[in-house]
């Protein structure tokens, strides 16, 4: 029975995220066509791309346009793979994706990608798969599958890293909460954000597993090192998130705890450090050599702090789930239900935590806000604000650490221990995940003003129609609930090892 639980959780995440890959129309994710063009180039081995011509001096030059002119690069795209037209319903949620039925232009073109200067490393696998495509629709799905495969491996490893038999599912409580519909959505898109987020979850899960001190298996070190390296290589902020996660673990176990982990790891710890260091050199080296840097003003940054603080509620909603080109929202109940779960888990964790653990949780909550606002201030000169997908790789640390603290210390509650909490969380998260899939499917099938039972009236349909992808989503949700129900049959018998 103990083996069935993590397998069911993995099956749940695989099924629900795979459904997103196919049930979300091509081009219906933030900047997906730009990532599409970059992946095509990476699949051909083209890393350093051609600069775009200088902008027309007479054209209006907003901060956003000036920044995109600096990051844009040209890529030769064959006529049959031309992605122009995939964004036909973006930012217009009343419009279905039926407009995608129009074909692409009929000639080879040099197309710009506004992510041309971004780190290219994680685009190679999707780009190689896209070489087998015959049109922009199949190319998008193949590229998505490339990113999805890496992302789902990271989430699956996180499940195995955190799972502890005989704990009623408490060891996976934080992970179930951390994998929001937004994480599911981003893991299924043609974008480096999904890998960054999922690798961030896996890296911290590995660090938490090592902090428990209950084993030092080689695969744990390998999973932690590989996920950390992937997070670093995915985007320029990956180095920052890896460092912050390391600080979180240091705060959890203290310097003596870290020294003990490293000493017990021996050569495995050395190998992990080398892997992370090599990835950091590759990422930072690319950043310094290729990526432009905006001119920043401390005075302007200070003045914009109130504006960035006002944006936090929207960023918070995005972290739970805002889909498409950030134009498709969950039902308000979804945001409230997820928030309620987070409040319960964090409150219980604070109640049972030792003093050090309370400081860690409090500091982590503050750090989430400070990091989000800080990144927004750094981005301000580009004209672009911060989106949740930019910071989720770090923000997921809050539910993960809160869940781990509750798992480690829940015995302090005695008879008041909420033994059914993991099952309740699984049921609520399953409902939220299905609801998220539904609102996105309806938006692109008939538009947000279309029929609620849209399947028969759909103006756009995914491959094989809507029925199999709806069934796969429901199957994944059922698997998640079944895993929690199975785990609940076992008595709690183990806990995590955190330093006092």
Image (cartoon, rainbow, N blue to C red):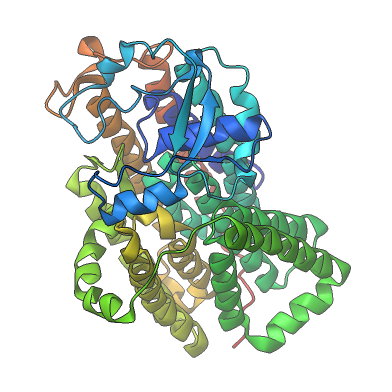
Number of residue marks = 0
At x 63%, y 57%, the residue is 286
Residue 235 found in image quarter: bottom right
Image location (x, y in percent) of residue 33: 42, 32
Question: Of 138 and 262, which appears nearest the observer?
Answer: 138
Q: Is residue 345 left or right of residue 393?
A: left
Image location (x, y in percent) of residue 258: 70, 81
Question: Of 9 and 451, which appears nearest the observer?
Answer: 451
Image location (x, y in percent) of residue 171: 55, 60
Tell me, yes or no, if residue 134 can be seen here. Answer: yes
Q: Is residue 297 above or below residue 392?
A: below
Image location (x, y in percent) of residue 152: 58, 40
At x 44%, y 61%, the residue is 419
Q: Is residue 49 above or below residue 251?
A: above
Q: Quadrant of the C terminus?
A: bottom right
Q: Is residue 179 left or right of residue 206?
A: left
Q: Is residue 162 above or below residue 344?
A: above
Q: Residue furthest front?
A: 57
Question: Of 254 and 481, which appears nearest the observer?
Answer: 254
Q: Quadrant of the N terminus?
A: top right
């Amino acid at each position: 029975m103990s083996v069935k639980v993590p397998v069911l959780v993995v099956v749940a995440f695989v099924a629900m995220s795979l459904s997103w890959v196919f049930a979300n129309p091509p081009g219906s994710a933030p900047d997906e066509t730009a990532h599409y063009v970059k992946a095509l180039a990476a699949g051909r081995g083209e890393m350093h791309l051609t600069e775009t011509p200088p902008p027309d001096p007479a054209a209006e030059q907003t901060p956003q346009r000036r920044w995109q002119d600096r990051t844009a690069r040209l890529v030769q795209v064959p006529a049959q793979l031309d992605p122009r037209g995939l964004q036909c319903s973006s930012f217009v949620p009343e419009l279905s994706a039926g407009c995608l039925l129009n074909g692409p232009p009929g000639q080879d073109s040099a197309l710009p990608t506004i992510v041309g200067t971004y780190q290219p490393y994680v685009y190679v696998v999707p780009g190689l798969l896209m070489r087998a495509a015959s049109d922009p629709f199949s190319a998008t799905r193949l590229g998505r599958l490339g990113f999805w495969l890496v992302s789902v491996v990271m989430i699956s490893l996180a499940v195995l890293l955190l799972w502890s038999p005989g704990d009623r599912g408490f060891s996976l409580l934080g992970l179930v909460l951390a994998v929001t519909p937004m994480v599911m959505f981003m893991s299924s898109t043609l974008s480096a954000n999904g890998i960054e987020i999922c690798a961030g979850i896996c890296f911290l899960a590995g660090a938490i597993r090592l902090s428990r001190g209950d084993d030092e298996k080689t695969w744990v070190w390998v999973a932690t090192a590989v996920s950390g390296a992937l997070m670093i290589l995915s985007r320029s902020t990956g180095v920052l998130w890896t460092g912050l996660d390391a600080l979180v673990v240091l705060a959890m176990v203290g310097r003596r705890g870290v020294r003990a982990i490293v000493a017990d790891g021996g050569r495995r710890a050395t190998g992990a450090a080398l892997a992370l260091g090599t990835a950091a050199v590759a990422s930072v080296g690319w950043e310094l050599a290729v990526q432009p840097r905006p001119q920043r003003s401390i005075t302007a940054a200070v003045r914009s702090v109130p504006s960035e603080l006002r944006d936090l509620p929207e960023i918070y909603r995005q972290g739970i789930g805002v889909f498409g080109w950030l134009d498709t929202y969950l039902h308000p109940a979804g945001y409230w239900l997820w928030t309620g779960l987070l409040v319960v888990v964090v409150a219980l964790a604070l109640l049972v935590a030792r003093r050090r653990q309370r400081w860690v949780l409090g500091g982590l909550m503050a750090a989430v806000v400070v990091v989000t606002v800080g990144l927004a201030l750094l981005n301000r000169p580009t004209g672009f604000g911060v989106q949740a997908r930019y910071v989720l790789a770090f923000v997921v640390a809050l539910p993960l650490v809160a869940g781990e603290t509750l798992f480690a210390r829940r015995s302090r509650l005695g008879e008041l221990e909420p033994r059914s909490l993991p099952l309740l969380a699984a049921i609520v998260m399953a409902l939220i995940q299905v609801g998220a899939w539904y609102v996105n499917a309806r938006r692109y099938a008939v538009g947000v003003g279309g029929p609620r039972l849209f399947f028969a009236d759909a103006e756009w349909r995914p491959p094989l129609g809507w029925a199999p992808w709806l069934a796969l989503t429901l199957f994944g949700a059922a698997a998640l609930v079944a895993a929690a129900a199975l785990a609940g049959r076992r008595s709690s018998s183990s806990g995590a090892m955190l330093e006092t």
